[in-house]
Image (cartoon, rainbow, N blue to C red):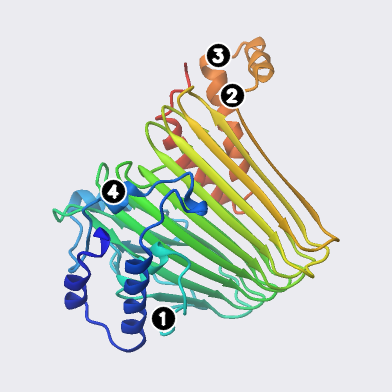
Amino acid sequence: MNLLSTYDRFSQAHPAQGALATFRQAGYDYALNKGLPTRKDEDWHYTSVKAISEGAFTSATSSFEPSHETLLQIKARLNSDFTNVVFFNGVLNKTLSAELPAGVVLSEALQYPEQFDDAFDALNGAYLTKALEVSIAKETSVEKPVNFVFFTSNEGGRNLMVHPRIRLEVGARSSVKVLESHYGLQDAVYFVNSVFDLHIADSAKVTYVRVQAESEKAFNIGRTRILVEKNANLESLALATGAALSRHSLDVVLKGPGSNSEILGVYAVRGSQHVDNTSLIDHHVGECNTNQLYKGILDGESKAVFCGKVLIEKGAQKANSAQLNNNLLLSTKVEADSKPCLEIYADDVKAAHGSTVGQLNREELFYLQSRAIPKDKAIPMLSYGFLSEVIYKISDENIQTWLSRHLDEAFSHLSLNR
């Protein structure tokens, strides 16, 4: 496995002891024996990671400060309305990071999972230098969104791979808005393999947003695991506009009755970009509501994958789940693969799923043209409205504005005036 060829060098540069050493070795053994997934694996049938497995990526063995030009690019990605926690090439940069608000504590994790979900999860563990844990005290309301910003560069002369791992514990009856944002040096080739674990305690309210706006020559594999307890509320949105190849695996487990989860996704890709959103919504108990909506625009020869599974376990009565994936095609050469799935083991539930793949509505386009709006203006208006509907389901206006800025950037590269 080529990605593990630098493991010995990495281990010597970053020696580990105790639980971390055990966890790293377990990750190495799992990844080495399992190997990266192929299209023969059902969960990866529509996505090939051959470009990653054959790539020459090196795990960073030393840290360096960003150059002045890179520093300007990083600062351009920061939002003054957020509390920004910045990582450069996988290392926390205290100079660029803001002080965390009261009630929010950042520390090094001392405990690690006992098993891995797949080879990428294991690879993250094998190359882990420090897992971080963020805890929010119970009955704490964090007003400003907290933004974990990961910026990756190859200006050191190598195509790096970085493996961030963060666990967020939100106390009972607390409220917080958190972003996980991934960016990189323009046209840089690198590989980001992240894991984000989120535990939402009883009656807490969390908004979680993942932004993937990497270099279009980069690779981004991300896994988010969310555990939702009794009467908790979750807003989740994953936005993807960058990377040559990206996949976000989202696992949401509903552990307590009375919870509500809004699970959203937006993607806009072009050229030969490939974006994959794979989700598992597990109704472990009943009397929970989940609504899942993913929308994407494809241009050029790009490809989008949506594989969404809703599992309603035995005894999870009165579970309510809806799932929908819509794709808008701007080219005859694009490909959208959509696979919504329901697996139900209870009889008193409400569950629905569906997907659509098509072009702009001709009647809507004709209506705008009949109101003196030229076609080259009407097409972008309808396309933007198609995606922005999802963004405005997030309740925080500052996050809405921030996501719209990313969408504007992506739209500036699409061929919407044809």
Tell me whether the residue at label 2 lies in contact with that at label 3, contact meaning CB atoms closer than 8 angstroms.
no
In this rendering, which labeled residue sits more in front, label 1 or label 2?
Answer: 2
| Mark 3 lies on residue | 375
The residue carrying pointer 4 sits among few (fewer than 14), some (14 to 19) or many (20 or more) residues within 10 Å by Cα, namely: some
* Quarter containing the N terminus: bottom left
Amino acid under disc 3: Lys
| Mark 1 lies on residue | 109
First in residue order: circle 4 vs circle 2: 4
Total numbered badges shown on the rendered structure:
4
Q: What residue lies at 22% left-to-right and 70% top-to-bottom? A: 7
Work out whether residue 300 or residue 386 is closer to the camera in this orientation and state it: 300
User: How far from the left and from the top, in percent, is residue 371?
Assistant: 66, 13
In this rendering, which labeled residue sits more in front, label 4 or label 3?
Answer: 3
Q: Is residue 292 left or right of residue 401?
A: right
Mark number for residue 149?
none
The residue carrying pointer 3 sits among few (fewer than 14), some (14 to 19) or many (20 or more) residues within 10 Å by Cα, namely: some
First in residue order: circle 1 vs circle 3: 1
In this rendering, which labeled residue sits more in front, label 4 or label 2?
Answer: 2
The relative height of residue 262 versus residue 111 in the rendered view (above or below) is above
In this rendering, which labeled residue sits more in front, label 1 or label 3?
Answer: 1
Amino acid under disc 1: Ala
User: How far from the left and from the top, in percent, is residue 383?
Assistant: 56, 28
Amino acid under disc 4: Gln
Q: Which residue lies furthest to the right in this view?
A: 348
| Mark 2 lies on residue | 359
Q: How far apart are marks 2 and 3 (CA)?
A: 15 Å
| Mark 4 lies on residue | 73
